[in-house]
Amino acid sequence: MTPAAGVAADGLLPAAVIVPFAGMLFALVLGGRRAVWVAAATIAAGGAIAVVIARQWWAIQGTLTYFLGGWAPPLGIALRADGPAVAMMAGIAVVIAGIAVYARADFGAPAGARETRSSLVYWLLLLSIFASLNLAFLSGDLFTLYVALELLTFSAVPLVCLDGKGETLRAALRYLVFALAGSIFYLLGAVLLYGAFGTLDIALLAARMQPGSTPWLALAMMTAGLLAKTALFPLHLWLPPAHAGAPPAASAILSALVVKGSWFIVIRLWFDVAPALAGPAAAQLLGSLGAAAIVVGSVLALRQERLKLLVAYSTLAQIGYLFLMFPLGYDASGAFVRGGALDAGVLQALAHATAKAAMFMAAGLLYKAYGHDRLGELTGAGRAMPVTVLAFVVGGVALMGVLPSGAYLAKKLLLASAAASAQWWWDVVLTAGGFLTASYVVLVTVRALRRPPADATPPAAVPRSQELAALTLALCSFALAWVAVAGPLPASLVKNPLAPSEFAWLMTTVVVGALLALGFAREAPFAAGAGAVRALRAVCAPVGRALEAIDYALRGWSVASLSLVLVTLAFALLMRTHG
């Protein structure tokens, strides 16, 4: 009756969830003018709890377990903190702190200023997302994960429409409806598993799991529902419009934090509940969807005329990286090995969280300063707002996977897993992904560094605290590498970034990225040989337009709904083939 658990934990695990929710209630009672201070104290307390849990986990090198009410599963509910959960909790606490510092200038209510609805609601939603994510990381059964998933969704949707405009309300409704469709798929799958095996506790379910039509269909439905919430291509119906109108501090939360909750639950399903049941064929499909997201998202990012939409589509591309770990969890014979793929996925998630939050924050500052975010009219931004542009560039370079960023370590671990499992094609995907990431970073950098027209209106001043918050989070993506090798990963993974081989690879990545930007961008970012440029753009432009047409079709309700059903059936059939 008692599942194989880890070391008994004290009350810190439930406190990681209860403290943010309690802070949200206190902020609601005290009102908008004091909500920011309650949020600051709560975030600090939540970060301290995450640090103490991480120290306890490091001391025992095993899973911390807490039974709510003292009742062990299947009668009770277990909270479990293993390595991935601990890493995600600590990293997310840092990102939330950085976003909170940035958001204070936009959603604070200083003395003498009129209180607004958004100055209260934003902080309530931020704390609710903090608590919901911790619950998703720590939950030990599939129904509690469903609860965390719904809390996360209903906290994230209002962030899209904080300004109350019609356009953002439509985007929020679009997000809500598609996310609820994903929830229905997940919940139906959980019901099927409970009916077949009599438990939803992850440890008990893993021990009882047997091949069969019911578990295959259940796992496929739950996976597809979670992909819809994560906005993995082609189930990204809600992502571009949600980011287009949301405030920058809200976009940073949606991109850096919210999608990580549903992605982490996919890890629980595939790596903990039923790794052998899922099988390598279905994992290849999951990785292929990730690879498609990298290509399509990056090219569409290059085709955008607005900076926020460029960063939104780059989020679609970077989400794809998070799913490359799944096929690499299997060896050449098709046996599940876990290996370094899981470490790589968690590192990639944290690197993306810090860097992408910084990029959205920087994009928001450029919009605030110029009154728009049209790329073609941001010339001279590098001179006028060097800290803001530096934050954007540092975040982008971190996502390129250059030494010594967290994404670099993730890429190294994925390449090692690909070599060990003889899956060479993922080497090609990872290399191409680095070039594509570099392309839109080069595009923005070149336009920001251009000399502005003589009659250009200088941008308005922006708060220095917001610029420093964005830059700090971008730098955290590099600090992540040193934290990782100081902890569980071998120090040999980090080499001298000025070594000739590493520097040559960085230059190659930038040059190839510049060529891709030159070919795919709607407007060429810089002049080059006229004949060569025309030839390159003649090849790339039709591809870009075709991908735009595909994206437009996939974001229609009928096609998106059909895609959700087809993805479910594809996973179920591939799992059945493996079984």
Image (cartoon, grey):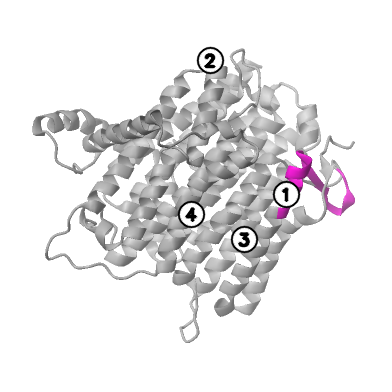
| Disc number placed over residue 55 in the picture, else none | 1
- Marks 3/1: CA–CA distance: 25 Å
- Marks 1/2: CA–CA distance: 36 Å
* Of pointers 2 and 4, the one earlier in the residue sequence: 2
Element type where label 1 sits in the image:
helix
* Of pointers 2 and 3, the one earlier in the residue sequence: 3
* Of pointers 3 and 4, the one earlier in the residue sequence: 3
Q: Which residues are magenta?
A: 52-72
Binning the other alpha carbons within 10 Å of mark 3 as few (below 14), some (14 to 19) or many (20 upward) gives many
The residue singled out by tag 2 in the image is 422
Mark nearer the viewer, 3 or 1: 1
Element type where label 4 sits in the image:
helix
The residue singled out by tag 4 in the image is 473
Q: Decide which of 541, 333 is in the foreground and name it.
A: 333
- Pointers 3 and 1 in contact (C-beta within 8 Å): no
Amino acid type shown at disc 3: Ser
* Of pointers 1 and 2, the one earlier in the residue sequence: 1
Amino acid type shown at disc 2: Ala
